[in-house]
Every structure is written in C-alpha cells, then in structure tokens.
Amino acid sequence: MVNIKRRFLRGYILVESLVAMAVLVLVSGLILNQINTNRRLMAENLHQQEVLSVATMAVQTKQDQLTLNGITVTVKRSKQGIAVYESGKEIIHVSK
C-alpha cells in the first residue's frame, strides 16, 4: 500500500520550489534590466558632458570647428549670439 499523504507532501514541496525559483528569476531579471538601463543613461550623460567640454574649449579658443575624442562641434557666431552644434544638432545657443 502506498502512502498518499507522503506523495502529496513531495509534490507540494516541488511546486513550492518551482514557485520560489520563478520568483528568483523574475527578481533577477528586473535587477539586471535596471542595471542595463542605468549603464545606458550613464553613457549618454558622459557623452553629453564630453560634448559640452569640447564646446567650451571651442568657444574659449575662438575656433569655428573643434574635434576632440571623436566629438566634433561647430561654433557659429553672429551679432545676435553664439550657437554650438554637434552632428547638426544645436547644443547651446547664447544670445546677447
């Protein structure tokens, strides 16, 4: 004769283990996704910081175009003010 209660207990432990494993995988996936998102944002912020540094150097040295560390900025001066562009996108615009 087979003890049904004992089999039921083993099955319950197995289901409980699978649920715990699923929760662990879900939490780990969420943490890794957030880490990747933060790394991407940090890389974007670092790029923006480098662009602003190169733009500052270009304005201070009165150059129309400056390339440094693979970043090219173009400075356009007029009587109304100064505009700084990177890859055709306006970064800074200062009016008098």
Image: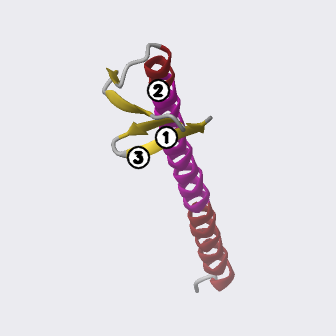
Determine the residue positioned at 49% across, 40% down.
Answer: 91
Q: Quadrant of residue 18?
A: bottom right
Side of 2 where 51 appears, left or right? left
Amino acid at dot 3? Lys
The magenta span reads 24-53
Q: Which mark is residue 89?
A: 3
SS class, disc 2: helix
| 31 is within the stretch colored magenta | yes
Side of 69 where 25 appears, left or right? right
Q: Position of residue 59 (x, y in %)?
A: 48, 21
| 29 is within the stretch colored magenta | yes
Residue closest to the eye, 28 or 4: 28
Q: Quadrant of residue 72?
A: top left
Q: What is the residue that sits farthest to the top in this orientation?
A: 61
SS class, disc 3: strand
Q: Position of residue 87 (x, y in %)?
A: 33, 42
Give the alpha-carbon distance from disc 2 to disc 1, as whole Å. 9 Å
Q: Which mark is residue 59?
A: none
Amino acid at dot 1? Ile
Label 1 near label 3: C-beta < 8 Å?
A: yes
Is disc 3 surrounded by few (<14), some (14 to 19) or many (20+) residues within 10 Å?
few
Give the alpha-carbon distance from disc 2 to disc 3, as whole Å. 13 Å
Label 1 near label 2: C-beta < 8 Å?
A: yes
Disc on the earlier residue, 2 or 1 = 2
Say which residue label 1 marks: 91
